[in-house]
Amino acid sequence: MTATFNAIALPGQPHIAYQGSDLMVEGVRLSDLARAHGTPLFVYSKAAMLSALAAYQRGFAGRQAQICYAMKANSSLAVLQVFANAGCGFDIVSAGELARVLAAGGDPAKVIFSGVGKTRAEMQQALKVGIGCFNVESEAELDVLSDVAASLGLKAPVSLRVNPNVDPKTHPYISTGLKGNKFGIAHEEALRAYRHAASLPGLKVVGIDCHIGSQITEMTPYLDAMDRVLDLVADIEAAGIPIHHIDFGGGLGINYNGDTPPEADALWAQLLAKLDARGYGQRQLMIEPGRSLVGNAGVCLTEVLYLKPGEQKNFCIVDAAMNDLPRPAMYQAFHQIVPVTAQTGEGTVYDIVGPVCESGDWIGRDRQLQVQAGDTLAVLSAGAYCMSMASNYNTRGRAAEVLVDGTQVHLIRQRESAFDTFALEQLVD
Ligand SMILES: *Cc1c(COP(=O)(O)O)cnc(C)c1O
């Protein structure tokens, strides 16, 4: 028996809500999507992506700012297309991501290339299409990039990723701006690295960047990082090296489970006040948000296969697994899990687990749910770092994806078949 749940708030997800007992994404019933496209199925709301972007755009109104979507969060072509059409550039970390940007109609001049391990071949490809900036992460990379650019008769535009040594107060696996991280150039070494960059024939210094971590839910680490970066800008410019743009990275968190990150516009009001106070408010600014643009714009639908009561634990076995939703297995991350058709009754406490042969294959622990085999559940906040991290482990084809726009539904990725997963393999004669 179903009940009416008119006002079940899904925190931070204005475009995903119950209407009556039906969980909807914009104007589309999720139970209909599961029936039409099967499960596991990722469903994204275009309006949710654009409203997350609008918070940044409001924050930067009247400033020279370029938002470069950090596409590793969700690199599906149609998602990139939404952001490209809205004027975004892209923060990429591989030549593969560059190929996706071009395939989605993105502007290479608005691409910035981050990452600690760019290969010569990747540098060449990026230079040939004329990307906007290389965010260089080590002195050794400066030499290689200069060499590659000079051999093409080009000058590579570079920014140095500096490490402000600020604790973002997030999970250690997604904290990147501390001294012990593999990312960036230490604050103390940055001026020397800039002098070195300015002396190389194949480079043109254009900016400075930092990125301190991910799922950051407080303002203070950003404000501290900004102070540290501006201190460096002053030192570098005093050494006669102009810094055209300042890139503050990404990392703003989303509400997964009662988290209370600042809104992007509120965060930028504070940061811009600091920039103004220090006299840098009219600079070209860049930011690289990933998770905060897509995380709460997506859900993953999954069917309950079996209920398996036990002495210590009850298991709810679903058809999505760690290969589709890797975040719990990787970082003990939390996703809310709700039925697509609201049910009455107390429910039972379950661990929600997938079919993969690993004890780490769980999606949620100790969740109270009123469910039966055959029901469809929605795993919330699944727009970021889910599909883009999905694998074929256990020879599971990757899920299909749909993009909802009002009442329209676009299939943006077909479900991968078993054959697709081994299409590039060969038997030996
Ligand atoms: C991952 C990453 C981002 C985006 O981080 P989010 O937490 O998804 O906003 C931005 N910049 C760099 C360099 C990154 O590696």
Image (cartoon, rainbow, N blue to C red):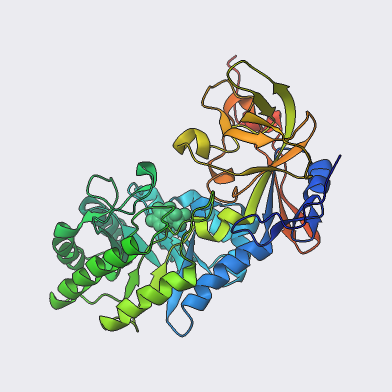
Where is 179 relative to 267, above or below?
A: above
The answer to which quarter of the image holds residue 351 is: top right
Name the residue rendered at 31%, 67% in the picture: 223
- Where is residue 68? Give x, y as percent: 47, 65
Vertical order, 178 against 109 (above or below): above
Q: x and y percent of residue 321 in the render?
A: 61, 32
Residue depicted at 22% across the width and 51% down the height: 140
**Toward the viewer: 243 or 271?**
271
Residue at point 19% right, 71% down?
Answer: 231
Residue 125 can be seen, yes or no: no
State the residue lying farthest toward the right.
Answer: 1
Nearest the camera: 418 or 209?
209
The reply to whether residue 95 is in sight is yes
- Viewed as shown, does residue 27 lie left or right of 280? right
* Quarter residue 209 falls in: bottom left
In depth, the one of 420 and 277 nearer the eye is: 277
Residue 377 on image: x %, y %: 71, 40
Assign ligand 1 to one image quadrant.
Answer: bottom left
- On the image, the x and y values in percent for residue 428 come to 58, 16
Q: Quadrant of the C terminus?
A: top right
Vertical comparison of 21 with 421: above or below = below
The answer to whether residue 414 is above or below residue 143 is above
Q: Nearer the viewer, residue 424 or 310?
A: 310
Q: On the picture, is 308 further left or further right than 391?
A: right
